[in-house]
Image (spheres, grey):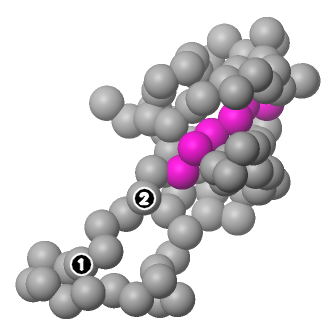
Amino acid sequence: MNFQPLGKRVLIKRVEEATTTMSGIIIPDNAKEKPSRGEVVAVSKEVTEVENGNEVLFGKYSGNEVAFEGTKYIVLEVEDIFGIIG
């Protein structure tokens, strides 16, 4: 994929959450909440706070979903990222 965000934006791929609870109960897809963590896939030239490969936390309803080659991503303003995990 070749995508370069513009402005102070980043492209994020959501990190999928577990499909079962610790006690073994399977969570159906329609009951799952969208995770608010993901991996940075691309950053604009203006962004210095994060880099490709960082795992980040972001607002649940932040950004805009886009799809490239069958994969869903989120384009976020860098201000919508709460922090880097790790």
Rate crowding at label 2 as few (under 14), some (14 to 19) or many (20 or more) other CA atoms within 10 Å.
Answer: few
70 lies above or below 45: below
Please give the name of the residue rendered at 47% of the width and 89% of the height, measured from the top-left corner: 31
68 lies above or below 34: above
Between 41 and 47, which is closer to the camera in this rendering?
41
Q: Position of residue 34 (x, y in %)?
A: 55, 69
Determine the secondary structure under disc 1. loop
Total number of numbered discs in the rendering: 2
Q: Residue pushed farthest front?
A: 69
Residue 8, image quadrant = top right
Q: Position of residue 62 (x, y in %)?
A: 73, 56
Q: Is residue 1 visible?
A: yes
Q: Which residue in the structure is indicated by mark 2?
A: 16
Viewport quadrant of the N terminus: top right
Q: Is residue 63 visible?
A: no
Rate crowding at label 1 as few (under 14), some (14 to 19) or many (20 or more) other CA atoms within 10 Å.
Answer: few
Viewport quadrant of the C terminus: top left
Between 69 and 81, which is closer to the camera in this rendering?
69
Please give the name of the residue rendered at 75% of the width and 43% of the height, measured from the top-left corner: 68
Label number found at residue 84 = none
Determine the secondary structure under disc 2. loop
14 lies above or below 23: above
Q: Which residue in the structure is indicated by mark 1?
A: 20
Q: Main secondary structure of the magenta part?
A: strand
Please give the name of the residue rendered at 81% of the width and 21% of the height, measured from the top-left corner: 4
**For residue 70, side relative to residue 63 (left or right):** left
Q: Position of residue 84 (x, y in %)?
A: 46, 32
The amino acid pointed to by label 1 is: Thr
Q: Which residues are magenta?
A: 8-14
The amino acid pointed to by label 2 is: Glu
